[in-house]
Image: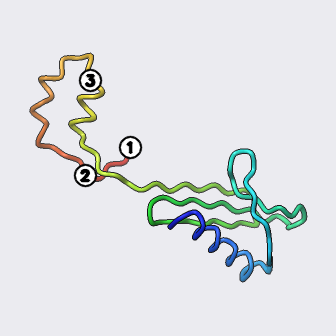
Amino acid sequence: MRFAGVRAALRQILTTEYGLENVQIQGDRFGKPVLSLLNFGELAFNVSQSGDFGMISVSRAGQVGIDIEKLLPLDIFVLMLASLHAVRARPVSRFASHRCTQCIF
């Protein structure tokens, strides 16, 4: 889901769920989306997108923050070699057959 698609979905949610029509969404100094209106109550929201996915969080209970990231395949052997380049890497070569296709640390 691209930036424009997530922003369009956010506008739809703000309109249908909260009755806020024709609002301007701006980024604060950190890039977090905010409404240009000063008087919109305690409404807080955040968006995140990565690859084909997007997420929107809206709250009346305080600030919210979300972040999503697309998982990419990771070759654990290459990571080990890069991390251990100063150390003799030859002994770890026996782990070459062990691959991690989706890892998160």
Q: Are marks 1 and 3 in contact (CB under 8 Å)?
A: no
Q: Residue furthest right?
A: 39
Report x, y in % for residue 27: 73, 54
| Residue 79 disc label | none
Query: Of residues 18 and 36, which is closer to you in this image?
Result: 36
Instruction: Name above or below for residue 86 compared with residue 7.
Output: above
The quarter holding residue 12 reads bottom right
> Rounded to the nearest whole Å, what is the CA distance between mark 1 and mark 3?
18 Å
**Mark 2 is on which residue type?**
Thr
Residue sitting at x 58%, y 63%: 3
| Residue 105 disc label | 1
Question: Which is more foreground, mark 2 or mark 1?
Answer: 2
Question: Which is more foreground, mark 1 or mark 3?
Answer: 3
Sort mark 1 into few (<14), some (14-19) or many (20+) by Cα contacts within 10 Å: few
| Residue 84 disc label | 3
Residue sitting at x 75%, y 58%: 26
Sort mark 2 into few (<14), some (14-19) or many (20+) by Cα contacts within 10 Å: few
| For marks 1 and 3 on the same chain, the one whose residue lies earlier in the sequence | 3
Report x, y in % for residue 42: 82, 64
Sort mark 3 into few (<14), some (14-19) or many (20+) by Cα contacts within 10 Å: few
| Residue 101 disc label | 2
**Mark 1 is on which residue type?**
Phe
Instruction: Indicate the secondary structure of the residue bearing disc 3.
Output: loop
Instruction: Name above or below for residue 5 compared with residue 38.
Output: below
Give the number of marks. 3
Asked if residue 90 lies left or right of residue 15, the reply is: left
